[in-house]
Amino acid sequence: MYSKYLKFIGFLSIFTIYCQGFAKSVPKKSYAASTVGLMKLLEVEDDLVENIKGYVEVLKKKLDLVEQSLITMSSEHEQMDNDYEMYLGNPVNSFRLLHRLHTDWRKWHNYALNTNKWELEPIEKAHKMRKLIPTALDLECACRGIDDLMTFYDLTPEELAAGNLAGYSKPETALTAQDCLALGEFCIGNRNKERAEAWFNTSLARFENTLKRYSAHKAWGTLLMMDQEFTAASYHFGKKPEELEHSNVDMLFENAIATKLNCSAVVKKPSRLLCRYNSSTTAFTKIAPLKMEELSTDPYMVVYHDVIYDSEIDLIFNSSQLSLSLISAGQKSEVRSSKDSYIDHTASELLDKRVTDMTGLNMDGSEAFTLINYGIGGHYVLHHDYRNLQNTTRLDEGDRIATVLFYLGDVDSGGATIFPMINITVTPKKGSAVFWYNLHNSGAMNEKTLHSACPVISGSKYVLTKWINELPQAFRTPCMNNSNLLPESNDLRLEKYVV
């Protein structure tokens, strides 16, 4: 009997000692650093509970007033339902009906919209108490302490979830499904996949609500996706209830699956299209035509061969400094594995003229050339180049009407650019460039331009990207409302185009 208590005391002692050591790296107010801090947190929770109770009372009073008034209004309406003509034949009733609709309903509308200051007091108090609640570091400390205890005492998630602590059973301390999920997510960050999966499994066993269960499935699926276990991950993402909206994680998973399958598939180029010399876009091409291979008419897509020279490629490489591909706020991109850079002004001016010769489009207002390098395994998941801007923003900034992608070197294996919705694969070939329109002639987004950069298996892939702005093209590609509008079927979901 006493041995169980000694084990439990030792359990708590280790947890407290660990958190005290961790406290050196967290703010002084850290609750997880000591039992005294945790006792203060109980007081904070008591205050929060009382505050919420007060807010519930405020809402109840408001609800009671509305319900009482609703009874009176319903009674009046029932009298009218019995015999409309008799009711409205009485001029007093007619007056009262007009008065109710003109005055009373307006009052109720204002009452619903306006909130008295005393009604907001619990909310303001809760806002001030936010400074007293635990931080993310507090939660990390607590998760780490539990994780260390599991290792030290060889405990399992099932035992802890049931309230069994080193042989000391206390069911009232059992963990909730959300607690287990949080510990599983901590284990992902701690790179302990086996334990994370055990926590997710325990969490799923405790969730009763289908919508809430999916949060555990999604976390588990994300973990498997990170390890490239797509088949196992698809099981968990397949558990998503229909009523849930598509999240960024769901889309990221679908993109990864689609990219993997399409990059592995044998995709054929369309037949019956032409290879010819383009001599019609500008005056220069009349005396120096460009080798052009047509790939698609919807979207319009061509490949130009031998369109950038070795000397120009050398100039680009010598004047550029590559850095890891980033998204906004300096964060590492989750969808692109590569390095990129802007190029020298001299090379940019020269290639702007080349792109105009290739496309017949105006380069004013377009984004700068971007040099991108994909190393071993470097890739970019399925995406569209257009930005799909809101109307007001689009009028000011313009969208990307077209894309030109130069290939600056050959790739030993892999690294193709795929367009799964039109069944096209473009293999990197030094000196070539692929050009396509991202928008229909009407200005609508062309969903069929969905594309991906497949992972590089062997070698290194260098591409130079130019996104062309639509605003300066007003007189070169006039907008035609009745031409190339959205396809008859708007069902363009990604999963339909997975090979």
Image: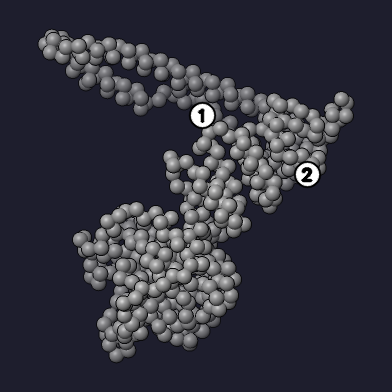
Q: Position of residue 313 (x, y in %)?
A: 49, 83
Q: Callout 1 environment at 10 Å: few (<14), some (14 to 19), or many (20+)? A: few
Q: Is residue 11 above or below residue 100?
A: below
Left or right: residue 99 compared with residue 291: left
Q: Nearer the viewer, residue 152 or 54?
A: 152
Residue marked by disc 2: 151
At a point 56% along the width and 56% down the height, the residue shown is 230
Closer to the chain start, of discs 1 and 2, is 1
Of all residues, the one furthest to the right in this rendering is 2
Q: Which residue is mark 1?
A: 124
Q: Nearer the viewer, residue 448 or 336?
A: 448
Residue 59 in sight here: yes
The C terminus: image quadrant: bottom left
Identify the residue shown where x is 46% and y is 26%.
Answer: 120
What's the amino acid at mark 1? Answer: Glu
Percent x, y for residue 388? Answer: 36, 57
Disc 1 vs disc 2: which is toward the camera? 2
Asked whether residue 466 appears in the rendered view, the answer is no
Q: Residue at x 55, y 23 (%)?
A: 51
Tell me residue 252's x, y (percent). Answer: 50, 55
Given residues 323 and 258, the one toward you in this image is: 258
63 versus 158 height, above or below:
above
Q: Quadrant of residue 365?
A: bottom left
Residue at the (28%, 85%) spot, across then down: 279
In the rendered view, tell whether residue 148 sits above or below residue 50.
below
